[in-house]
Image: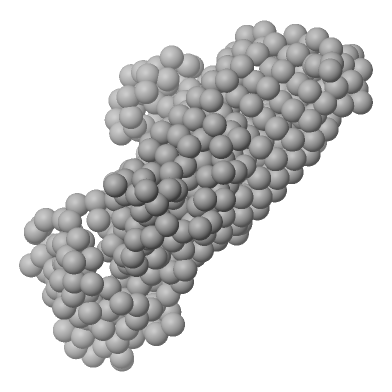
């Protein structure tokens, strides 16, 4: 399996917008064509090889190395192949992607997988805010796909998401599942405040006790069957979602009553 | 207070509800005072939206926000019965935890109250022509703030392109500050970044920002020695006539001369320039 390897020469002084770094763009390009791809350094129009050392050609598999925290829009709109990133990465990673896999060994910034429609994003470090969210003024966030973050996450995770799965390993900040329309958010270490604010539909699962908004109503403790299915599905990613009756139950809160109130927040209570 | 055809008794026909976390001097001027628990604004407004939709909420849930059921019901009855209601909100709402979502909550409540009566929400602006900046950006670009032009067309994403976030992350290599003093109000990382990069300040006075700037250009104070238009809080444009002469140029003249000097320079956009022409301001 051939791979295209990009190594950042030095961290750009202002944000670098590189939506051309996707398997779809480079799959059929030679090394010199890849080097000539257009990137935007601030307002300046530059070539990809002004910032990256490029190795390999004509492949759907890309590896990127370096401190990419100012490099934005990597993998935007990708539909196939794989992207493997070693180092911290900037905003809009995998935004609007429809397929393929992105793996990050490092931290990622805001808007990971914003408005994505398919594919898998796995962040081994911390994520930023607005993961799988809708852009400002847009009605729906991610419509399908999976985002897995091993570390913490920022504000407004899954804002207005419609379908798909987000799993956050460590603490999530405020407004997780804001205005959610569907899909599932799993928070393995709980969240700060205002979880599920204004959610219309969808499921938020918290494996730790978490603060519940006053517009959520307690509606009993049980072990929903669909969590078994989710738990088994997530085992393949090494994620352990509790579901066994012998281990505990989920408290269900219905909300947000400020809107239609058909969403649910499930909080795990171990025995 | 103004008497009118529909409100013949003036102030007596109007109701003022004050919402704050503590009793301030404005309590005396208000008819109803609601003391909300600090950091519970978003929860309170969302709860009021739920009560407006006639959802069941418990007394415990209401008590979490610092108010009682009677206070909430009374407030909603008054709001629904009003002929024309206005929410005025300031930095206590928009700059505390939750920030833009607190404002969004109040705007949504105002929108939903329009099912019953006319209701609007209006931000209480700070000093200077803040509304003017928003209004002009809005009709020029379609967005009020947090805009980038780096692709040749406006793109809007607050949090990514808004001033404080750009400066805190250190995303700029130059800063041009006109008629503002971010050096006095912004968080420390933003101030440190402004001190690090070439910062240019246009201001009639020496400010905190000009002390950390590389260049300070003294300009004539707008509205006193320079003409122009300021927008009132309710977006009414007010023409300003200068009362005195100033030896200094106006902000507009300085920006125009910088623009003319930049237009003289060789194209710096790279091999594939975008179709942006420097337009002389006549």
**Picture residue at 46% right of the left edge, 63% below the top:** A263
Image quarter for residue A15?
top right
Judge from the rendering whether residue B143 lies leftward or rightward of residue B56; answer left or right: right
- Residue A256 in percent (x, y) is at 40, 65
- Residue B11 in percent (x, y) is at 18, 80
Judge from the rendering whether residue B265 lies leftward or rightward of residue B103; answer left or right: right
Residue B44 higher or lower than A246, as above or below: below
For this orientation, the residue located farthest to the front is A246
Judge from the rendering whether residue B58 lies leftward or rightward of residue B266; answer left or right: left
Residue B235 higher or lower than B81, as above or below: above
Judge from the rendering whether residue B114 lies leftward or rightward of residue A85; answer left or right: left
- Residue B127 in percent (x, y) is at 31, 47
Q: Nearer the viewer, residue A87 or B226?
A: A87
**Picture residue at 68% right of the left edge, 22% below the top:** A84
**Picture residue at 51% right of the left edge, 58% below the top:** A225
Q: Is residue B240 visible?
A: no
Quadrant of image for the N terminus of chain A: top right
Q: Is residue B67 visible?
A: yes
**Picture residue at 28% right of the left edge, 62% below the top:** A214
Q: Nearer the viewer, residue B218 or A24?
A: A24
């Amino acid at each position: 399996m051939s791979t295209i390897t990009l190594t950042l020469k030095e961290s750009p002084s202002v944000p670098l917008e590189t939506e051309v770094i996707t398997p779809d763009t480079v799959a059929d390009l030679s090394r010199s064509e890849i080097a000539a791809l257009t990137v935007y350094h601030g307002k300046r129009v530059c070539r990809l090889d002004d910032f990256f050392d490029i190795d390999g050609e004509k492949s759907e598999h890309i590896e990127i190395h370096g401190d990419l925290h100012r490099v934005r829009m990597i993998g935007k709109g990708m539909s196939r192949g794989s992207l493997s990133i070693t180092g911290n990465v900037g905003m809009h990673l995998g935004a609007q992607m429809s397929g393929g896999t992105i793996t990050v060994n490092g931290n990622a910034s805001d808007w990971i997988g914003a408005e994505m429609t398919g594919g898998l994003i796995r962040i081994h470090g911390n994520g930023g805010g607005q993961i799988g969210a809708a852009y400002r003024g847009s009605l729906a966030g991610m419509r399908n796909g999976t985002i897995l973050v091993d570390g913490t996450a920022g504000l407004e995770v899954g804002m207005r998401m419609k379908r798909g799965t987000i799993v956050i390993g460590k603490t999530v900040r405020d407004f997780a599942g804001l205005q959610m329309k569907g899909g599932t958010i799993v928070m393995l270490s709980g969240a700060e405040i205002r979880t599920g604010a204004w959610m219309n539909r969808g499921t938020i699962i918290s494996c730790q006790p978490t603060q519940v908004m006053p517009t959520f109503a307690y509606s009993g403790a049980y072990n929903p069957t669909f969590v078994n299915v989710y738990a088994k599905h997530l085992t393949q990613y090494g994620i352990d979602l509790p579901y066994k009756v012998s281990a505990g139950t989920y408290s269900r809160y219905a909300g947000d009553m400020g809107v239609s109130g058909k969403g649910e927040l499930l909080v795990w209570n171990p025995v | 207070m103004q008497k009118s055809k529909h409100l013949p008794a003036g102030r007596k026909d109007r109701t003022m509800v004050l919402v704050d976390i503590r009793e301030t001097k404005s309590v005396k001027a208000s008819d109803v005072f609601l003391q909300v628990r600090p950091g519970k604004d978003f929860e309170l407004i969302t709860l009021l939206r739920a009560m407006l939709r006639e959802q069941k909420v418990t007394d415990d849930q209401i008590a979490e926000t610092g108010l009682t059921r009677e206070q909430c019901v009374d407030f909603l009855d008054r709001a629904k019965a009003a002929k024309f209601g206005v929410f005025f909100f300031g930095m206590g709402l928009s700059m505390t935890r939750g920030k833009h979502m607190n404002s969004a909550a109040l705007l949504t409540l105002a929108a939903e109250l329009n099912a019953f009566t006319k209701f609007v929400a209006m931000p209480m602006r700070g000093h200077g022509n803040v509304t003017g900046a928003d209004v002009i950006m809005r009709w020029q670009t379609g967005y009020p703030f947090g805009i980038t032009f780096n692709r040749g067309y406006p793109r809007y994403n607050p949090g990514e392109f808004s001033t404080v976030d750009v400066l805190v992350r250190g995303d700029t290599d130059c800063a041009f500050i006109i008629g503002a003093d971010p050096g006095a109000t912004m968080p420390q990382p933003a101030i440190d970044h402004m001190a690090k990069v070439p910062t240019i300040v246009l201001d009639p006075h020496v400010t905190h920002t000009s002390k950390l700037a590389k260049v300070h250009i003294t300009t004539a104070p707008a509205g006193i020695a320079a003409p122009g238009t300021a927008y009132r809080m309710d977006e009414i444009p007010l023409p300003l006539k200068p009362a005195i002469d100033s030896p200094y140029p106006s902000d507009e003249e300085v920006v125009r001369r910088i623009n003319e000097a930049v237009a003289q320079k060789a194209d710096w956009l790279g091999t594939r320039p975008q179709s942006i022409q420097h337009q002389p301001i006549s």
